[in-house]
Amino acid sequence: MDFWRELLRSIGFYLAVLALSGCSSTSILIHKDDTTFAEAQSRMAKMVAQVDELKPPPIERALFLQGESFYQYRFNPPAKNTKS
């Protein structure tokens, strides 16, 4: 009986820590002043305008824009600092 009580207590503790840690930090991937993201958004808006001028079928438009959005994907997330 003590084993199960200790197990439940430790699980409860870890769940509480997990829940609190999710609320205590900001996103480490996209910040408001992220220039890389802003440039990607601008590049994507230009690409959408160019594609819309061609008036492709909706399915081809969606597939092309999906592929284009992954083309210059940022593979390295920013380094964590003491705040995160």
Image (cartoon, helix red, strand yellow):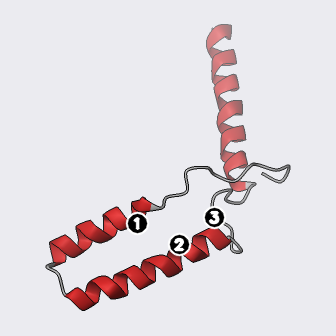
Determine whether, in the image, residue 78 is placed left or right of residue 60.
right
Across and down, in percent, residue 72 comes to 48, 61
Residue drawn at (69%, 53%) of the image: 78
The type of residue carrying mark 2 is Ala
Across and down, in percent, residue 79 comes to 74, 49
In terms of secondary structure, where does tag 1 sit? helix
Residue drawn at (49%, 58%) of the image: 73
* Numbered label attached to residue 57: none
- The alpha-carbon separation of the residues under discs 3 and 2 comes to 12 Å
- The alpha-carbon separation of the residues under discs 3 and 1 comes to 16 Å
Instruction: Kindly indicate whether the residue at mark 1 contacts the one at mark 2 (C-beta within 8 angstroms).
Output: no
The type of residue carrying mark 1 is Ser
Q: Residues within 10 Å of mark 1 (few under 14, many from 20)?
A: some
Which residue is the site of mark 3? 30
Residue with the most extreme left position: 57
- The alpha-carbon separation of the residues under discs 2 and 1 comes to 9 Å
Residue with the most extreme right position: 82
Q: Quadrant of the N terminus?
A: top right
First in residue order: circle 2 vs circle 1: 2
Determine whether, in the image, residue 72 is placed left or right of residue 78.
left
Residue drawn at (71%, 74%) of the image: 33
Which residue is the site of mark 2? 40
First in residue order: circle 3 vs circle 1: 3
Q: Residues within 10 Å of mark 3 (few under 14, many from 20)?
A: some
Comparing labels 3 and 1, the label whose residue is closer to the camera: 1
- 2 to 84, vertically: above or below: above
Across and down, in percent, residue 23 comes to 70, 55
The type of residue carrying mark 3 is Ile
In terms of secondary structure, where does tag 3 sit? loop
